[in-house]
Image (cartoon, rainbow, N blue to C red):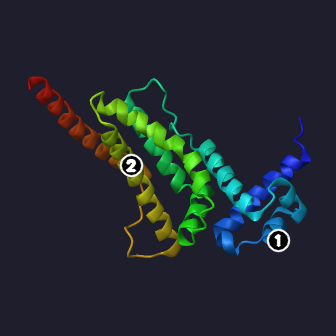
Amino acid sequence: MARPRSEITKEKLLEAAAEVFVSKGFRDATIAQICKQARANVAAVNYHFGSKEVLYQETWRYSFNKSLQAHPMDGGVNADAPAAERLRGTIQALVERIADEESRDFFILQMEFVNPTGLLDEVMRTERIQLRSKIFSLMKELLGPGASEKQIIFCTMSVISMCLHTMMIQRVRKKTNDLSLPPEILNLEAFVEHVVKFSLAGIAAIKTEINADTSARKEA
């Protein structure tokens, strides 16, 4: 069944907007540039989005979801696999998503960090809660029932930060050729393995503390 023409036009606008926002950022991008790239008229932007601000938000959401389709959050690991394997799949998917040149949601974020607009705060919070919730659940399972919410949150933040911070710096280094930044990671698989081992070792150490505290309370 053929797709409606309006749906095709909307997708073309989102694809074009992603390219323009990646290269110019929100403030320097113009509706005229986006429409020229999409071979659409300004009326189409007004009809589908109503404003440049909404187009910006929807472009990030579109790019984010497209990135997730290419790199599913579970990394291809079955839901009934051991928690450690599921954590590895989640970490691998996140690292591969950020490294993928087609993951334009991260490129848009780079421009947003350089020249913040605040327009993506809410849409990012809504969409990215999926990732935090997934890793939070894994941490809760790996740390055991004795873990406090603070411990689970700290472990969740640590894993996400290791991936996001490192890979975003990699993208900046590649784009700017700034040799003062850490050297380029040429083997993503090796980096994923490092993050997994580092994370599991940290989780094991915290779990040992939790178990020791639990035993001490019982003895008291």
Question: Which numbered marker is on residue 110?
Answer: none
Question: Of residues 68 and 59, which is closer to you in this image?
Answer: 59
Residue 41 in view of the camera: no
The correct choice, above or below, for 38 with respect to 4 in the image is below
Q: Quadrant of residue 167?
A: bottom left
Give the left or right position of residue 131, taking residue 150 as reference: right
- Badge 1: residue crowd in 10 Å (few <14, some 14–19, many ≥20): few
Q: Residue furthest left?
A: 220
Residue 111 in view of the camera: yes
User: Helix, strand or loop at disc 1?
Assistant: helix
- Mark 2 lies on residue: 157
The kind of residue tagged 2 is Met
Residue beneath the point at 51% across and 36% down: 74
Where is residue 169 drawn, in percent x and y? 44, 65
Give the left or right position of residue 168, taking residue 84 as reference: right
Give the left or right position of residue 174, taking residue 198 as reference: right
The kind of residue tagged 1 is Ala
Q: Quadrant of residue 35?
A: bottom right
- Mark 1 lies on residue: 32
The correct choice, above or below, for 200 with respect to 23 in the image is above
Where is residue 175 drawn, in percent x and y? 53, 71
The correct choice, above or below, for 210 with respect to 19 in the image is above
Specify the quadrant that holds the N terminus: top right
